[in-house]
Image (cartoon, rainbow, N blue to C red):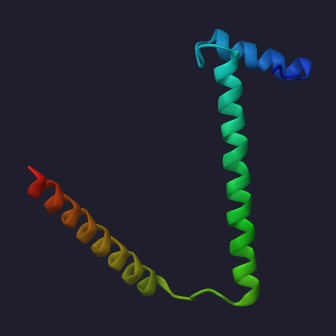
């Protein structure tokens, strides 16, 4: 399958390949499509967050509240990491 690009985009693509950013045109186009997919995911997440804000589905907190929240997240993350390390150690 071929991809028809504007002359400007084709030139940009060829410059990226020539500069060694990608091994060939196919890899450059695959990366471009991957970025478009990621963009769509981010737009969907932004729309979801906007809808949550509009519906009042959010938590308001100040500086101390944020610090407390992130401390809890960090503690939970460390506990999960430690648990995974113990499971890995027991397998040995």
Kindly indicate the quadrant of the structure image that contains residue 31: top right
Kindly indicate the quadrant of the structure image that contains residue 89: bottom left
Which of 3 and 74 lies nearest the eye of the viewer? 3
- Viewport quadrant of the N terminus: top right
Which of 48 and 53 lies nearest the eye of the viewer? 48
Which of 76 and 88 lies nearest the eye of the viewer? 88
Above or below, comparing residue 31 to residue 66 in the picture? above
- Position in image of residue 15 (x %, y %): 71, 14
Above or below, comparing residue 22 to residue 54 in the picture? above
* Residue at image coords 73%, 62%: 44
* Residue at image coords 9%, 58%: 90
- Position in image of residue 43 (x %, y %): 74, 59
Kindly indicate the quadrant of the structure image that contains residue 66: bottom left
- Position in image of residue 68 (x %, y %): 37, 83
Above or below, comparing residue 72 to residue 30 in the picture? below
Q: How many marks?
A: 0
Say left or right for 77 vs 46.
left
* Residue at image coords 69%, 19%: 26
Outermost residue on the top side: it is 18
């Amino acid at each position: 399958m071929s991809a028809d690009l504007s002359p400007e985009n084709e030139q940009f693509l060829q410059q990226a390949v020539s500069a060694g950013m990608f091994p060939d045109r196919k890899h450059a186009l695959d990366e471009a499509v991957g970025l478009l997919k990621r963009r769509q995911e981010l737009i969907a997440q932004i729309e979801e967050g906007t809808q949550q804000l509009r519906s009042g589905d959010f938590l308001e907190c100040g500086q101390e509240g944020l610090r407390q929240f992130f401390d809890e997240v960090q503690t939970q993350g460390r506990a999960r990491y430690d648990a995974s390390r113990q499971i890995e150690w027991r397998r040995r």
